[in-house]
Structures are given as C-alpha cells and as structure tokens.
Amino acid sequence: MKENSEASRRGFLKKLATTTAAVAAGSSLIAAGKSNQSFYYLKKEYKPFGPNDQVNIALIGAGGMGTQDAIVALQVPGVKMVAVCDLYDGRLAEAKKRWGNDIFTTKVYKEILNRKDIDAVIIATPDHWHQQISVDAMHAGKHVYCEKPMVHSVAEGPAVIKAQKETGKVFQVGSQGVSSLGNEKAHELLKSGAIGELNYAEGFWARRAPIEVWQYPIPDDASAQTVDWETYVSNVQKRPYDSKRFFRWRNYTDYGTGMAGDLFVHLFSSLHFITESMGPNKIYASGGLRYWNDGREVPDVLLGTFDYGKTAAHPAFNLSLRCNFVDGTSGTTYLKLVGSEGSMDVTWDSVVLKRNKTIASDDPFYLEKLRKAGQTNSARKHILPPEEITFDAEKGYLGGPYDHMNNWITAIRNNGKVTEDAVFGYRAAAPALLCNDSYYKNSPMFWDPENMKMVKKA
Ligand SMILES: NC(=O)c1ccc[n+]([C@@H]2O[C@H](COP(=O)([O-])OP(=O)(O)OC[C@H]3O[C@@H](n4cnc5c(N)ncnc54)[C@H](O)[C@@H]3O)[C@@H](O)[C@H]2O)c1
C-alpha cells in the first residue's frame, strides 16, 4: 500500500463505484446509480470443468475436519473419493458408511500414497503428522491439501517448502478464509485506500462450552485394540495408550499447537492475504491456565501482540490477538483492520467498512485547550457517526471453504498455483507457533518473515 493521500482517498471513492459494481454485478443499488449506498452484495462466479477433469482424492485423518473437508471437496464437480486412512477403526467404519463400501480403507498412510489411482490427498491428522505426511505425499506424486497449521514447529517448515519446490505438486494449506469473498473484498478495499493508512489490526475468540474448548467426547470402544497408538506416537515421546491424548490431542503439546496454532493461525492467514504481508518481526505472548484443569498442557487464555515492520506492501502496524476459553460473554471471531481514516470488520462472508467523516472533537476538555491556544470554536463541528458500508455475500454463496477447495482442485486441473501454498502457509504458521515459544519461554521472539528465519537478539 502506498502512502495515503487525498488522491488515494478520492481513488477509493471513485473505485467504490466501479470495482464494487464489477464484484456486485446485478445489484439493484448499483444499477440505480445511487452514490450513498450503505450496502453492497459480493458475488462469485465459478468456471465449468471439462469431461476429462476428474480428480480422485483420498483422505488421511478422517476425524471432524477431515470429514468436512472431504464433504466440501466432493461438492466440487468432478471430484471422486477413492480411499481413506485413519488410525481409529471407528473412523474407517464411518467413512465406508458415508462414502460407500467400495472405498479403500487403511491405517497405513503409505498404502494410500502407493496407489496409482489417487491424484491428491487431504491431510487432516493432528498437527504433529502434517509435515511428514505432506512431504511423503508430494514425493509420491500426490497433490496435497494440508490442514492448518502447516507444521507443528517452526523447525519443520522448510522441509515442506523444499518438497513443494522439488516436486512441483499443488500444495495448499487449509485456512479457508483466504479464498473467501470477504477476504477478497477486504484486500481490494485496503489497497484502494478505504481506511487510509493501516496502523493496527486485531482479532479474538471467546468460547466457553466444553466441546468448544477441546473436551471432545471419547468413543465407548476407544482402546489400544481399536486405535493404532504405536503409529500415533511413533514420531513423538513414547507413552502408554491414553484415550485423552488421542481424541483430545489439542490439549497436549506433543500433538497440538495450542490456541495459537489452532486459531491465531487463521487470522494470520487472512491478515497476510489482505495486507500482502509476509509476517511480523516481533512476537510476544502471555496468558495462563485459568479454569480448564483437566490435565491440559496449554493455556486457556492467551494474548499475543505482534509488530509488523514497514514493507513495500504495507506500512508498519501492530496486531493484537486474544483467545479466551473461559469467556462468559461468548462472542464472535473477527478480524478488524484499523487505519487513519476508518476501519474494516472482516469475516469470510462480509466486510463492514467504517469511515470517519470528521476528526473534530466536541469534548469540553479539548475545546478548552483550543480556546486557551487562542483558537476560536466558531466552526465547531459535531462528531458524526462513521459512514458505514456493508459488503455482504449474496444469498446462496457457497462460502470460503468451498472456494478454498475449488481453488485447490482448479489448480490441480490447470497445473496452476494457489495463494496459500507452502511459503504462505509457513509464514502464517510461524508467528502462531512462535506465540507458544514466547509463552513458554516468557520472552519475545524475533522473526525474519521475508527469509523465514529466527532472529537472535543480543
Ligand atoms: N481449517 C479449519 O477450520 C479447521 C478446523 C478444525 C480442525 N482443523 C485442523 O484439522 C486437523 C484435524 O483436526 P480435527 O479437529 O479434525 O481432529 P480429529 O481428532 O477430529 O481428527 C483427526 C483424525 O486423524 C486421525 N489420525 C491421527 N494420526 C493419524 C495418522 N498418523 N494417520 C492417519 N490418521 C491419523 C485420528 O484418528 C482422527 O480421526 C488439525 O490439524 C486441525 O488443526 C482445521
């Protein structure tokens, strides 16, 4: 983003009438040519696929998210489910029930990778398996959709980037928001100067219900006989079978990546897409375990602050993220971007743009200061409510998850590229994972986002 100026502001207003009209083609408001609309529809069009474009997929990790990912992938025309891998018998049985007895099922992911009839795999295992399965899959000639965070630790990232470069396979990380209409519009608005000069961003999660805070139900038949525990812990510390560590893996650092890896990473992905940023250079986190003393090793309240340096793409700005699993008020996840002339609340389906009409104050304290400085108050203005414009997805919009999957399948078909590739995925995962390092070490972490390397401060 260039330095903001009257020209860029005027540019935004002018563009609002043209580019928005393009995105929202058919909107009666635009068609009516009104200049003071406060609501616009966002619209998406999809390209048809050819008869030879079938893509055969397999799912590795058929739990909650993997199943959802596969359901969405199968909504993309020309996609077929061929095989499923999971370490728990119950999930394999469910997969056959859902996708038919003909699908191949196994507990050994390499048996999936060895099959010639599979073009692409969705990897939705717990985080500690993402890197190894992704690298093995690309080397076996498969395109990969890997759930977020791309890796379990910062040290694991370069191997995935290397495998993608070496194999040329389409590799996409699963932060779906990046492909959504809401993120797309926010990117366009920021670039056109809609909020002036960006200086701050924030996001939060407020949760309270046990199911939301990772106390998942454990199946009645869960045991060392129905779960391949040996494989599960084969790349981390060996321990005796433990159902909680398998079915509630997010609570344990060997397998999960805490609130930051699980949730912050989504906002890093969206923020980096919207701002064209490579990431922060300073990361600091604090928090604590306030309530959920159920044996978890990760905090249930976490705050993160991040410094983004000035780059060719954006000015320097600060980011604040927070997550509270004991929040009695509950609330929504959102990403807010604040600039010198306004702000944007961004979701996958909408952007609410607020622009300040005046910076004049009617606070008596400041008015007295003005009077003392010899400045008259004759031109006193009232604060007006900010000008508010809502951009909302049209009814029937298939959503960020569909667009994300569709982008991956389209890139596979066309030998094309995706936005959230291994480099992008690593740049989103690293600051999230460094939050955990900061929290446990009680120290800020320094990161070179361009070169994707840790920086040691004397
Ligand atoms: N993009 C999103 O919005 C989103 C939402 C939720 C979860 N996720 C991500 O999806 C992944 C899975 O999360 P979940 O909530 O579905 O967990 P889950 O526990 O419901 O499912 C994980 C599945 O992986 C299986 N598994 C474990 N190790 C395996 C291995 N080595 N090989 C094959 N299968 C293995 C387990 O048996 C389980 O069925 C995580 O990385 C998580 O961060 C992303």
Image: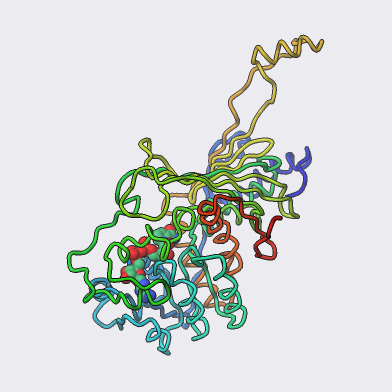
Q: Nearer the viewer, residue 210 or 48?
A: 210
| Left or right relative to 16: residue 122 | left
Outermost residue, left side = 220
| Quadrant occupied by the C terminus | bottom right
Residue shown at the point (66%, 60%) measured from the top left: 449
Residue shown at the point (61%, 36%) measured from the top left: 34
| Left or right relative to 126: residue 203 | right
Residue 52 position within the rendered picture, expressed as x and y whole percent measured from the top left:
47, 83
Asked if 311 appears above or below 102 in the picture, the reply is above
Number of callouts: 0
Outermost residue, front side = 458
Residue 147 position within the rendered picture, expressed as x and y whole percent measured from the top left:
45, 66
Residue 97 position within the rendered picture, expressed as x and y whole percent measured from the top left:
23, 73
| Left or right relative to 9: residue 66 | left
Q: Quadrant of residue 160?
A: bottom right
Q: Nearer the viewer, residue 192 or 421?
A: 421
Residue 174: in sight, yes or no? yes
Residue 59: in sight, yes or no? no
